[in-house]
Structures are given as C-alpha cells and as structure tokens.
Amino acid sequence: MTRLCTLVSGSSGNAVFLSHGGTRLLIDCGVSGSLARSALAGIGERCEDIDYILVTHEHTDHTQGVGVLSRKFDIPVIASKGTWDGMNIGKICEKNKILFEDYAQMDVGGIGVTPFDIPHDAAMPTGYRFDLGARSVAVATDLGHISDSVRAALSGCDAVLLEANYDADMLENGPYPYYLKKRIGSASGHLCNEDSGELAAHLVRCGTKQIMLGHLSKENNSETVAFATVARVLERCGIAVGRDVLMGVAPRYTSGAVIAL
Ligand SMILES: [Zn+2]
Ligand SMILES: [Zn+2]
C-alpha cells in the first residue's frame, strides 16, 4: 500500500512522509529530530525505517532536522546541487550525500522520483513527483506562482500536496512589514489561496482525486479560509469537493490525514 502523510506543515516546519512497496521517504524535515520522531510514531512509523530524505530547498522550515536525522539514523539525503550548496545542516558523510543537477527522473528505492523546478526564492528549489506503479503523487509547496514546469509535473497525479499559503486580503491588511508582504506575494514567494484553487481546478480536470492543501501561513491564512477559498474556485469551475475531488488541509503542528492509495 502507498501512504502519503504530512507530519507538520507551514512556516514553522514542513515534513512529509511517503511509503510505497517497502520504501519509506521523508520529504523535508523542518522540525527537530525529536519532533519528527514523535510525529512519525503518531502514524506508526519510526525514524530507523526511513530510507531517504529528499529536500526541496535550503530554507530552515524545510531543513532543520535533516542533518540530525541523517547522522543519527544513517539516512541518505537527496537534494539539488543548489540546495546542497545553500543548506546548513552540518556534516553529512559522502555516502549519504546524493545530489542532482538536472530534473531527470531518479530511481529511489524502487520509486520513480521526478524533481521539478519550482518558482521560489532559493538556490535550486525543487518539487517532487513520485511514480508509484500505476499511481503518482506530488509535493508542491513554496510556489511563487504557477509556472509551466509545476503545471506539467503535477498534471495527472492521483494525489497532490499543494500550497495554499495566504489569503490575499489577510496578507495585505495583516501585521507583516511591507518588505515581507512583498516577498511573500512576489512571483518567487508563496502561493495565495485563489491561485491554489486555479491550479487545483486544472489538476482535477487532469484526473487528480485527492488534494491536501498545505504550507499555510499562520498570520495570513487559516484552515477554514484556505479550504473555503479553494473550494469556491473549484465550484466556479464546476468541480464539487466531495463529489469530484477529496480535499483536506494539512495541520500546522500535527500529522495530517493519511492518504492511502
Ligand atoms: Zn522556502
Ligand atoms: Zn517553506
């Protein structure tokens, strides 16, 4: 069975668990090693059994626990060259350091992993699509806008973890300083709920059956607002949540619903 589950999601830390055919992956680990351990225990998994950690980019909300876990449990870490150059995770032994310089598909423990370029203000930020036999899933957060590469990579996936970072009005009227508002709202920042809805509609038209909204901003969004906005955009496109697609929101501090395929 294939299982996909967020362990934590948001600017305070991101980590996603994926298992398929006996291979267990973490995508990012932006919390401490002990928090990752307890989050994994919550879904019946152990750090000892993680085979690889894939990193999307060097920001600490995605990398905080990566080095610790790799050293403690001897886990290989996979990331783009730019991410390796930019991330500060302490020393990783050579055998556990796997880097890629282009977006070709890789075999990771029997899972076909295709990295793809995401528009975000990091060195070589990467989303990942996972081909799992007849199924495919993808992790796509930290999207400044919906680029062609993102759209192409996600099309046809059965399940997608999709960013819904902020509500545009909440960001504009919220407490953040001007420079931060500008960064988040820029084409290499984060994705607003409306745009997330637009992309979600495209994905459902291409066959996606399950969408988990994630990486919500604490100050400029809420689970209710994100869900309602995306559902409204979908409805505008003739797509009903529950009938045409299952949709959930990844909680900030705890593990989300397990998507089983
Ligand atoms: Zn980031
Ligand atoms: Zn992030």
Image (spheres, rainbow, N blue to C red):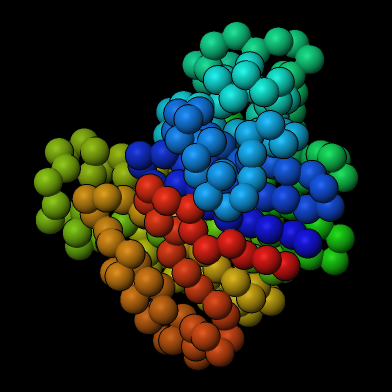
Using the image as rendered, state which of residue 172 and residue 208 is in the foreground: 208
Q: Quadrant of residue 67?
A: top right
Answer left or right for 214 relative to 51.
left
Rendered-image quadrant of the C terminus: bottom right
Residue at x 45% of width, y 35% of height? 35
- Residue 151 in sight here: no
Q: Does residue 257 lie above or below 240 as drawn?
A: above
Residue 223, horizontal then vertical, whole percent: 33, 64
| Residue 72 can be seen in this image | yes
Q: How many marks?
A: 0
Looking at the picture, does residue 252 appear above or below residue 48? below
Closer to the camera, 194 or 217?
Answer: 217
Q: Position of residue 91 (x, y in %)?
A: 60, 9
**Which residue is found at the position 63% from the left and 16% from the top?**
71
Indicate the position of residue 169 as horizontal and vertical percent values.
20, 62
Q: In the picture shown, does residue 259 fall above or below 102?
A: below
Question: Left of 235 or right of it: where is 150?
Answer: right
Q: Residue at x 34, y 76 (%)?
A: 228
Position of residue 3 relative to residue 125, above or below, is below
Left or right of 22 on screen, residue 99:
left
Q: Residue at (49%, 58%) from the top-left corner?
A: 256
Tell whether 102 sits left or right of 60: right
Residue closest to the eye, 112 or 115: 112
